[in-house]
Image: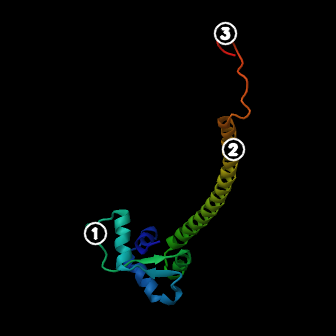
């Protein structure tokens, strides 16, 4: 999550959130938080069609991982922080469960497709063999039904 989104959730200004993080930087190793590069920020703006004229940012935003968001509660003081952190952690847990469920569903679908393709392949081979027998004249069956005098 980006610093300005978290600041909005915590009902504080981004500069205060960043100030608290910088004052406690040892609590935020690279796997908890990192600063976006200019290129990453531009890519983010392009992907989400955000306006540069919105006021813009003078500083590159911080991006927080799940652990970084949890660590924020120890450096921010408002009571709101506790409630927001609990909600964010629950969202992360649900997201993780969803992605695990998605991976499991994807695996089942791949297995089904493999099994089904094998079955269709067997049916296709059998039909191809039957069609080949008919073309060579083997096992031609006698016509049945109403016969006129012209047919034998």
Q: Is residue 86 above or below residue 125?
A: below
Q: To which quarter of the image does residue 14 belong?
A: bottom left
Whether residue 80 is situated above or below residue 135 in the rendered picture: below
Q: Residue furthest left?
A: 53
Question: Does dot 2 land on a helix, a strand or a loop?
Answer: helix
Contact between labelled residues 3 and 2, with CB atoms less than 8 Å apart: no
Say left or right for 69 vs 62.
right
Q: Secondary structure at mark 1?
A: helix
* x 56%, y 64%: residue: 91
Q: Residues within 10 Å of mark 1 (few under 14, many from 20)?
A: few
**Residue 137 x/y as whole percent:** 69, 34
Dividing the image into 4 quarters, which one contains the C terminus?
top right
Label disc, if present, on residue 100 of the rendered structure: none
Q: Would you say 14 lies left or right of 24 here?
A: left
Disc on res. 52:
1
Q: Camera-side residue: 66 or 85?
A: 66
Of the numbered discs in the image, which one, if any, rests on residue 123? 2
* Cα distance between the residues tagged 1 and 2: 59 Å
Going from N to C along the chain, the mark reached first, 1 or 2, is: 1
Q: CA distance from mark 2 to mark 3?
A: 40 Å
Q: Is residue 147 above or below residue 131?
A: above
Mark seen at residue 149:
3
């Amino acid at each position: 999550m980006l610093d300005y989104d978290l600041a909005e959730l915590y009902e504080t200004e981004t500069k205060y959130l960043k100030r608290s993080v910088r004052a406690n930087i040892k609590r935020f190793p690279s796997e908890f938080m990192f600063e976006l590069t200019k290129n990453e920020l531009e890519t983010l703006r392009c992907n989400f069609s955000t306006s540069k004229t919105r006021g813009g940012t003078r500083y590159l935003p911080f991006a927080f991982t799940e652990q970084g968001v949890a660590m924020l509660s120890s450096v921010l003081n408002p009571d709101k922080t506790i409630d927001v952190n609990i909600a964010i952690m629950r969202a992360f847990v649900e997201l993780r469960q969803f992605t695990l469920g998605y991976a499991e569903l994807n695996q089942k679908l791949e297995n089904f497709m493999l099994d089904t393709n094998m079955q269709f392949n067997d049916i296709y081979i059998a039909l191809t063999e039957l069609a080949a027998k008919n073309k060579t004249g083997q096992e031609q069956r006698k016509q049945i039904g109403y016969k006129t005098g012209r047919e034998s």
